[in-house]
Image (cartoon, rainbow, N blue to C red):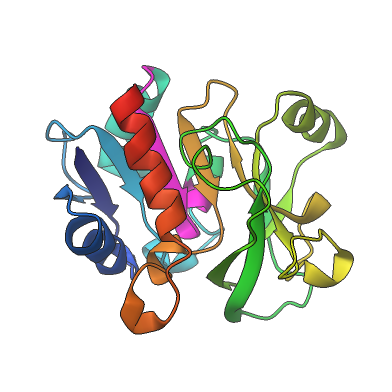
């Protein structure tokens, strides 16, 4: 499988994502610069974390207009698989490829720590191979991770099983105390109705190497690869 990792000015998790996909998961990876005009035949596009364009205006709001995003949006609208992590999730929401928005954490502080998430939708490319009762320990690193959607959108997300992950405690219990940023209904990630665009705030690429004493993120990457073989 050939992954394309988009790099914006200010991306700082691109190499983490590339290392995980290439060195840990053994996949072919193409680095896509934000000014590129094509996706170079990639099968799966990833928007990594960081601070694209310095997070001026709103996080992801300027990156959404990068030249390569025209191709990324066309790719997704034609059914291509697209995955955004942290800032990448913010870009996908700004581009209206995913519903909702990411607001400032309720603490108004940047939060960098390990949290636990559990899969909600179990029939998506990024969650299908994760045990339903498994609480994944995955780090977050964001100042604007507070997921918000209006009541109608939130109902649609629940009705259509579009919520990928919810923040939980280490035993898988979804509680107010396990919500690190104030996200509505503890939402840590969502997908589109078509199930080809995925976004999440936690960083699975930072939890995929034995050297980090945490490999829970591999569940997500393994799910992507195994589902790709089925498709």
Q: Nearer the viewer, residue 53 or 71?
A: 71
Is residue 20 shown above or below 79?
A: below
Please name the residue shown 38% across and 19% down the image.
Answer: 79
Q: Is residue 55 magenta?
A: no
Would residue 70 be seen by someone viewing this image from the given angle? no
As drawn, the residue found furthest toward the top would be: 78
For residue 224, side relative to residue 148 (left or right): left
Q: Position of residue 28 (x, y in %)?
A: 13, 47
- Disc count in the image? 0
Q: Is residue 79 magenta?
A: yes
Is residue 143 shown above or below 186?
A: below
**Which quadrant would the C terminus be assigned to in this image?**
top left
Would residue 84 be seen by someone viewing this image from the given angle? yes
Q: Nearer the viewer, residue 188 or 65?
A: 188
Please name the residue shown 35% across and 37% down the image.
Answer: 226
Q: Position of residue 11 (x, y in %)?
A: 33, 65
Q: Position of residue 205 (x, y in %)?
A: 38, 64
Q: Position of residue 76 (x, y in %)?
A: 39, 26
Quadrant location of residue 8? Answer: bottom left
Please name the residue shown 77% across and 77% down the image.
Answer: 107
Quadrant location of residue 38? Answer: top left
Q: Where does the magenta region start and end?
A: 78-91
For residue 23, side relative to residue 105 (left or right): left
**Which quadrant would the N terminus be assigned to in this image?**
top left
For residue 45, side relative to residue 58 (left or right): left
Please name the residue shown 78% across and 69% down the image.
Answer: 178
């Amino acid at each position: 499988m050939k992954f394309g990792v988009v790099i914006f000015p200010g991306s700082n998790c691109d190499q983490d994502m590339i290392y995980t996909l290439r060195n840990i998961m053994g996949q072919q990876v193409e680095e896509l610069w934000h000014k590129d005009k094509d996706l170079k035949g990639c099968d799966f596009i990833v928007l990594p974390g960081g601070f694209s364009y310095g997070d001026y205006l709103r996080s992801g709001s300027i990156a959404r207009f990068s030249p390569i995003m025209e191709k990324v949006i066309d790719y997704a609208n034609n059914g291509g698989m697209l995955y955004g992590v942290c800032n990448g999730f913010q870009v996908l929401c700004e581009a209206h490829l995913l519903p909702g928005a990411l607001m400032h954490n309720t603490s108004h502080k940047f939060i960098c720590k390990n949290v636990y998430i559990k899969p909600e939708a179990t029939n998506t490319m990024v969650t299908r191979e994760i045990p339903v009762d498994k609480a994944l320990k995955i780090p977050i690193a964001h100042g604007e991770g507070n997921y918000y959607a209006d009541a109608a959108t939130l109902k649609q997300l629940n009705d259509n099983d579009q919520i990928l992950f919810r923040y939980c405690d280490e035993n898988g219990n979804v509680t107010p105390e396990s919500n690190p940023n104030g996200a509505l209904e503890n939402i840590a990630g969502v997908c589109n109705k078509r199930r080809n665009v995925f976004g999440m705030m936690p960083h699975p690429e930072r939890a995929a190497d034995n050297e980090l004493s945490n490999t829970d993120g591999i569940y997500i990457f393994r799910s992507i690869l195994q589902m790709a073989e089925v498709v």
